[in-house]
Amino acid sequence: MSIVINGASESIQVALDAAPATNQLPCVASYADQGGSAGDNAINTSGTTAVTLVASPGASVSRVINSISIPNRDTATRTVTVSKVISGTPYQIVKVTLMTGYQLFYDGGWKVLDASGNFAENVTVNGGTITSNQGTAAALSGAWPVEVTDGTNVLGTSSHPVRIDPVGTTAQPVTGTFWQSTQPVSIATLPPLAAGSNAIGSVSVSNLPATQAVSGTVTAAQGAAASISGSWPVLVTNGTNALGSSANPFITAPVNMSPTGVTLTTTTAVAMFSATNQHINSIYIVNNQAVLAAGSVVLTLTNGQGGVIGRFTLPTATGAAPSPYTVVDMQGLYIASLNGGTNPTASLSANLTSGSFFMALSVSA
């Protein structure tokens, strides 16, 4: 189909859909006038402002357009509109969107060439409408996307799901057996088990770590008692030290008193206990590396009224290690009421140069 412009009132114009991102598009046209003259013209587009690619031939002259070439040299996709102007009014001939590097070409028919110069689309102009052949289908990865809509909204979303009934709001029937209408289900809502069976299934665990973290309160059974040789050991303490050693002997108190013992280092009398009417069963004396310049140390016990309960010669250490503890059996010596006297006391006959003696009493009512 030939493009012909006649007289002084007709021309060919080119315009873009928007200002280019980087470059205007170069346009070239060749033509021939009736009467034998021929020519061509080159011009750049000017964004959305139409430019004249082929001027009017003049009065009573017809000009035939042989070719038009408009490559997209911009860095963005551009839409090109070619129009025929008659008496100042543009009439669209073709409108094509060109990707970067593509070219709109006319040589008796409109074509689009890709960046390699191959035909990208077959274009037929029919009353201003372009019909294009999309080409052979490619692989799925290169397929053209398709958007499904209801004419207004994109379908397939939570607010506009795709429905398979003709109305779009009708509840859809579902066949089959369902144990519960609302999930999740509970064991109580499941069908009853077979008679004589209470097992739903089993779980096999083969990769538990050797050590498991436990929180909360754990109660453990010690198990059946074994023989003495296999019994569990028991450690008796006073809250700080293990009892039963020379440094921390057992101290018995059959009644409501717990003598804690006294430490002796000088001749100053130290009160032993404040209870009266008691029997002294035994005295425990521990030498904590007490060393004298010479001689022995005498321990004197009084009843708090000036009366002497007893005097005991104490062993002293001769080296770094303390002497073993001494137990004096008092055979239940009875201390009567103090009658206004002071507490029973203990004192040494000489000051120690180092160390100390520890003394504790076992008493009973």
Image (cartoon, rainbow, N blue to C red):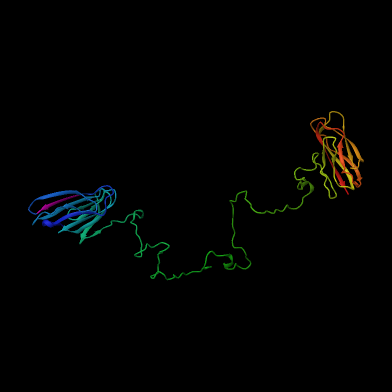
Residue nearer the viewer, 76 or 21: 21
Magenta stretch: includes residue 29: yes
**Residue 11 visible somewhere in the drawing:** yes
Quadrant in the picture for residue 81: bottom left
Residue 7, given in percent of the width and then of the height, sits at 10, 57
Q: In this view, does 81 lie to the left or right of 244?
A: left
Q: Is residue 248 left or right of residue 282?
A: left
Segment colored magenta: 27-33
Q: Residue at x 10, y 53 (%)?
A: 33
Residue nearer the viewer, 131 or 227: 131
**Residue 288 visible somewhere in the drawing:** no
Q: In this view, does 173 lie above or below 297?
A: below
Magenta highlight: main SS: strand
Residue furthest out toward the top: 294
Magenta stretch: includes residue 226: no
Q: Residue at x 17, y 55 (%)?
A: 12
Residue 302, given in percent of the width and then of the height, sits at 89, 40
Residue nearer the viewer, 194 or 88: 88
Residue 40, given in percent of the width and then of the height, sits at 14, 49
Residue 154, given in percent of the width and then of the height, sits at 37, 62
Q: In which quarter of the image is the N terminus?
A: bottom left
